[in-house]
Amino acid sequence: MSSTASFPSLPNRPLTVAVLGATGAVGQELLELLAERQVPIAELRLLASERSAGRQLVWKGRELTIEAVAAGSFEGVDLVLASAGGSISRRWAPVAVAAGAVVIDNSSAFRLDPEVPLVVPEVNPQAALEHQGIIANPNCTTILLTLALAPLQARRPIRRVVVSTYQSASGAGARAMEELRTLSRTVLDGGEPLSEVLPHSLAFNLFLHNSPLQPSGYCEEELKMLHETRKIMALPQLRLTATCVRVPVLRAHSEAVNIEFEQPFPVEEARALLAVAPGVELLEDFAANRFPMPTDVTGRDPVAIGRIRQDLSDPNALELWLCGDQIRKGAALNAVQIAELLLKPAQPAQVPAPSAARGAV
């Protein structure tokens, strides 16, 4: 992607906003968050494919009609929140930018483009102000990981990260979530679960992430974590290896993280840093063996971190566990927070505080 235009801020007035992919799980969450966080909106346009055109959705008590995305959909639009897949974004994001909109894109289409900022507001907020029309929203697992890594890297340099993910059905979209519900009932009723959305049934099962395998033996999801973390944290030589697994959880991802530093990092110091880190909540009770679970973060903004401990095999390494809602902070919330950064261009970039309220799934 390249552009000669540069317009880092959004206009200081109620916005015309388009949600591209409004009918998907992330699109639905975007609509909830736009209302909940009171983003100043004068007009909201809901865009999707031809098959969804004409459907009605209620937003803030008003019925809105979904439109099929077309060349004229972005005329007069200030902000596009796109969550409709990489091919759709590659086609329509440049059209929206040419029409004068800022695009915050949730797909992988532009994440590694050197001209496109890849932003987690709690980690690299200033990057959002360097855009040329498109800002990329990182992969869900990367967002959750960087919230844990950034406060620690700021205190002591990180040498290597080993992460294993436990990714819920929500990462594959609304249809995968519904399939998990359906096939779980099928198994309980004694039937054979036959998956149509995912390559294997997730009901009472797990499998290595279903993104395409690369010649290295890593899948795309695992390489996203490597390259995106390097870009967000401005650590191009960071050594990171990931194993990504799809698990039978409806919503919210989990990660087991091993972090090796250049020198020893006292556990209590790391715990104190993470306890006050933006976007994070500390959840650990060693006496009760109680640490973060997907149900703790479902429908909520913070990433829950716990079980911070010394790696017994390496004096310079720590272990921790985290859980975060993939649809919320892993996708929709991060995008809305980026938009909020652009609404305050005259001030130093501040990370909008996460909502404390629990939301319904």
Image (tube, grey):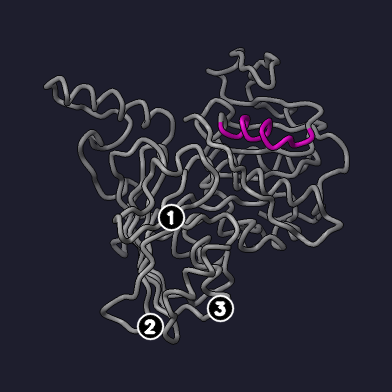
Look at mark 3 in the image and give the residue it sits on: 155
On-image quarter of the N terminus: bottom right
**For discs 1 and 3, the disc positioned in front in the rendered view:** 1
Look at mark 1 in the image and give the residue it sits on: 283
Say what amino acid the circle numbered 1 marks: Leu
Q: Distance between the residues labelled 3 and 2?
A: 14 Å
As drawn, the label of residue 255 is none
Residue at 32% x, 61% y: name it.
286
Q: Nearer the viewer, residue 105 or 361?
A: 361
Q: Looking at the image, can residue 228 be seen?
A: no
Describe residue 167's horizontal placement relative to residue 270 as left or right: left
**For discs 1 and 2, the disc positioned in front in the rendered view:** 1
Graded by Cα atoms within 10 Å as few (under 14), some (14 to 19) or many (20 or more), the crowding at tag 1 reads: many
Provide residue 345's location: percent of width, then percent of height: 83, 55
Residue at 32% x, 39% y: name it.
249
Mark 1 or mark 2: whose residue is earlier in sequence? 1
Describe residue 310's horizontal placement relative to residue 3 as left or right: left
Displayed quadrant of residue 246 = top left
Provide residue 305's location: percent of width, then percent of height: 44, 58
Q: What stretch is highlighted in magenta?
A: 29-40
Q: Nearer the viewer, residue 80 or 275?
A: 275
